[in-house]
Image (cartoon, coloured by chain):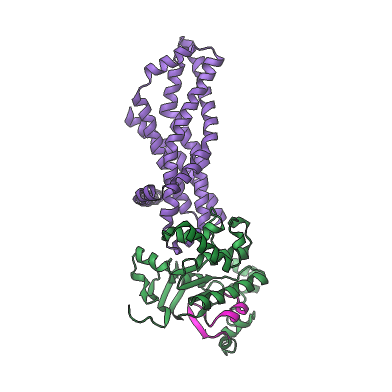
Chain colours: A purple, B green
Amino acid sequence: MLRELYYIARGFLRTSGALFLFFLRLLRYSPTVLFRRFPLVVHQIHNAGALSLVIIMICGFFVGGVLGLQGVSNLARFNAEDSVGTLTAFSLLKELGPVITALLFAGRAGTALSSEIGLMKATDQLAAMEMMATNPVRRVLVPRFLGGAISMPLLTAVFNMVGLFGAHVVAVGLLQVDAGAFWQQLQANVGSSDVYEGIIKSVVFGIVASLLAVWEGYNAVPTAEGVGRATTRAVVKTAIAVLIFDFMITAVAI
Amino acid sequence: MSKPSENIVEIRDLDYARGPKEIFNGLNINIQRGKITAIMGPSGTGKTTLLRLMTRQLVPDRGHIEVDGIDIARLNQRDLFQLRQRIGMLFQNGALLTDYNVFENVAFPLREHTRLPNRLIRHIVLTKLHAVGLRGAADMTPAELSGGMARRVALARAMVMDPDILIYDEPFVGLDPISMGVIVRLVRKMNDALGISSIIVSHDVQEISTVADCSFLISHGKVVASGSPDELRNTTSDLVRQFMHGMADGPVAFHYSAPDYAEQLLGRDAE
């Protein structure tokens, strides 16, 4: 029993160490890729970000809408329906926006990243690049990592905006909350520190989700089964890591 | 550098093991400049591994590998990449980059390593594609190509930097006779017209015999025979004869090592 725990702990530490070194390796090449090969990054922002927009907006709208519904019906018990704007904004900006966007991102863009990189490995494309004297870490992994990490905060912003709009549609449009009160209360109570908390979270989640997706893809066993497993692992690990980091950042921020 | 040696690749006393399985054990090979050299052997003898060792995609446990007079074990990454720019490699399945079309695949090394203007790149790429007969396929994606076409595109890509050495990993596997004939002719043509050295890994005895100047037969981690294909064909060694003539019986057993057949069927060893 103790011995098993020891092996598990040792394995975890070893993987974390390797992951951290991998992260440093990505960071080392990041400036050159950003400044010299920016079109590659733009292409990946399109893949990871722009192509995720629809799903982010749909989910954002309904999450905001449900917050509006719950907010109005529950706040009505205290005669505080007018605060629904504030409640929605706090929930979205500080918690739900970054977390749900990160989870959706892992499902939509993270899986695409892992499976794409895994398949490139399985079909010798990465080895072929090495043979063409091109470093695949710099050419393939770093642009994808950067594209994902840059997309996440932007997607979170879109999610929050559409979410607030959804809440407005439900609360003001359907449940007759006063539009002036909705926005006025929101404006009076939500400060820049609340926004920053969300931004910091989305930046961290973006780095975590992209890093794990790229890492799992790059370390996939180069077979059909291996790539499938890597994709699953990327999503599961991202979900766990995001929730743990969410807790830690919130604990520090409060 | 002193006068270029006669051998483009020299391998001495090479040992390499993958886990507990020993793949090479004291392997020695000299590959001559300007010739087409075939490396043959039964499946699983590590022919592809040997190519990867030659290009330092893998690092040997022991031994010495020189490519064009350079000891590749001592190279740092920059010098290794510089050396690799002079080596073209054709992977077994082509290994074309799936997010680019045929043209961009062939242009990839040029765009990565040179600052040539687009017009010149276009010119070079179309020339190379023309040489493999696929100028008309420039706008197709790798997914639209047949196996033979993909390998020809990969060949165009391998030679777009005008390498000194072209390495082919199983270029004939899974091709129909026509595509196979096309590739064989291309290998010969490229080698002679461009004055490069070619190394082919294959177990396709018939095709290899028509194209190779010299061949090495590897088995159990060592070179068991070398010489021109005709010399190999007329050898007296049982193993070489078995391989060259494709016989089921010989030193390479048909059966993978297993417990006694009757005993196993009767279930005696289960007890």
In the displayed structure, A81 sits above or below B226; it is: above
Q: Residue furthest front?
A: B119
Q: Is residue B256 visible?
A: no
Q: Quadrant of the C terminus of chain A?
A: top left
Image point 41% across, 75% down: which residue? B15
How many dots with numbers?
0
In the displayed structure, A233 sits above or below A223; it is: above
Question: Horizontal and vertical percent for residue B162?
Answer: 47, 69
Question: Horizontal and vertical percent for residue B265?
Answer: 66, 69
Which of the 4 image quadrants contains residue A189?
top left
Image point 45% across, 42% down: which residue? A148
Image point 52% across, 35% down: which residue? A53
Of residues A178 and A80, the one drawn nearer to the viewer in this rendering: A178
Q: Is residue A55 visible?
A: yes
Q: Is residue B228 in the magenta section?
A: yes
Of residues A200 and B103, the one drawn nearer to the viewer in this rendering: B103
Q: Residue furthest top?
A: A79
Which of the 4 image quadrants contains residue A240?
top left
Query: What span is in magenta?
Result: B201-229
In the displayed structure, B61 sits above or below A239; it is: below
Of residues A120 and A150, the one drawn nearer to the viewer in this rendering: A150
Q: Is residue A225 in the magenta section?
A: no
Left or right: where does residue B152 sit relative to residue A213? right
Question: Horizontal and vertical percent for residue A90?
Answer: 41, 23
Question: Horizontal and vertical percent for residue B175?
Answer: 64, 68
